[in-house]
Image (cartoon, grey):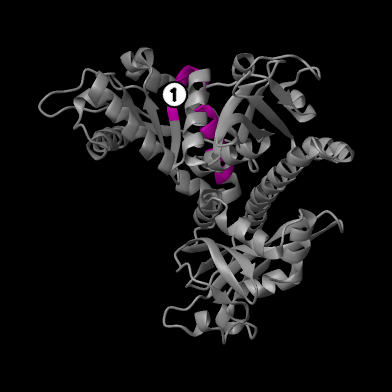
Amino acid sequence: MPERLYNAAREIAMSPAELQTLLAAAPDAAFEMVAKIARELIAAPIAAVNLIEGDRFWVKAGFGMPKQPLPRAEAFCDVTVDSDAPLVVDDATTDPRFRSLAVVTAADPVRFYAGVPLHVTDRARQVTEAVGTLCVMDVTPRSLPPGALAVLRQLGDILEKVIEAEVATAAAVAVARTAAEQSRQLQRQDLTFRQAERLARIGSWWFSLQTDETLWSEGMYRIYELPPKTALSVDEAIGFFSGISRPDLAALVEKTTQTGEPFTLELDFVTAKGNQRRVRSIAHVEFEEGRATGVSGVMQDITEHWLLEEKLRRSADTDSLTGIANRSAFNRALSEAIERARSTQAPFALMLIDLDEFKGINDTHGHVVGDDMLRAVGARLRDPMLAGSLAARLGGDEFALIVTDPTLHADLPGVAGRLLEQLRQPVETAAGVLPISATIGYARFEDCPETARGFIHCADKALYEAKRERRGSARGYRTFGRRSSDEPAG
């Protein structure tokens, strides 16, 4: 393992091999989510998170490529890591540094590459060092769109936070376990233990299975936001958690007693001051002469780490330009609404919205102005009058609205008319105030085939009819053989 990982490992009293093992064992979901976001935002067929392992890179997460190690000498990422700076290669076949690489001379060669280094902080030396990369690639020569490198850097920053959180959690648990075992025997270690708890936001605890006696470290009172030495029973302590009771805890203890394996809990938690937190607790049962006598463990406030993961999940479901749901989130929400309607007969509707003459705006004023228009539409689709509805950008100038509120569903023509008025309001753009309009087609689920495809087809048919009759209007779906009761709006 290279010097940079040795330095990072040294900081948390972990061998370089252990740090490598930690990163390999870290959950793949966050890494894969960031790689997927990078691929979709930059519209590249290949995206990967690569980490250094000796003289090669291994793929922690990847799309569009095999997850097999690659020698550093054969990797674009080696230049990214060694230079510790972003690297963009428009056409590898014209770059003397890369044109002889195996991935460039292959039958289906990589031509385009863009990557940013990923770092681990060595606080002991007050430096950060690159330990891997986040990159996107394409088999076609191309240039990176304006602003895309900044997006790649921001996604790299998120990954560094994920890596830092994994390292910090491992360090916290290691420090807490060591300190908890020795604090009763070596008084001089007490100060170090309390400082470690404060830094890692952890606390240690113990309770007797015979007497219910409890012992808490200072860090536990800090997590609970209670004055030190506050007396709490086991039941009172459990009452701060959501989703667990004394019988639940007893069942976990019994299982651990039988298997000898520690148990881990991750739960929502409300402090004594009413603050919402997310905590993780790891515990094991203590035995004396073959009999379970107590339970000891550590608890960590993982709120920041959990919120970061939630942010990643939201990013995967959000259109980065408009701030509303993307197509993936729309498809999932529509499927869920259909399943709900099938089981409960709950009415809901779908509106498809196309901007009028949007291509002309882009051609005349450029994409910056077009983006201003799209952002304005996204904001208007979040209007309070549409409360309870899911707004999504399906792509380009196409938007959708899933309407589940019964009041809105009962007045779809009126809702469509009011929405058209909203969308007709001029937009302040980089080119000045510009007019805008949209056309809407909508359908009720009960009037359509009970599939997502069939439902979308109904709304799309209504949209087509509205465009054919008059752009800037709204039309409801007309069922076969009869005209919908919806009067044209707009």
254 in relation to 62, above or below: above
Percent position of residue 453, x then y? 25, 40
481 in relation to 114, above or below: above
Element carrying mark 1? helix
87 in relation to 289, above or below: below
Whether residue 366 can be seen here: no
Residue 299 left/right relative to 335? right
Query: Residues in magenta?
Result: 370-390
Tell me the chief SS of the magenta region.
Answer: helix
Between 23 and 250, the residue placed more toward the observer is 250
Residue at the far front in the pictured view: 289
Percent position of residue 369, x then y? 59, 45
Would you call the spot at circle 1 few (<14 residues within 10 Å), some (14-19), or many (20 or more)? many
Percent position of residue 339, x then y? 28, 29
Question: Quadrant of the image for the C terminus?
Answer: top left
Q: Residue at the spot x=59%, y=35% of the render?
A: 287
Between 243 and 207, the residue placed more toward the observer is 207
In the figure, residue 283 lies in which quadrant? Answer: top right
Residue at the far left in the pictured view: 481
Q: Residue at the spot x=42%, y=33% of the render?
A: 438
Disc tally is 1
Report the amino acid beneath label 1.
Leu
Q: Residue at the spot x=48%, y=30% of the render?
A: 254
Residue 332 left/right relative to 25? left
Q: Which residue is mark 1?
A: 419
Percent position of residue 15, x then y? 71, 62
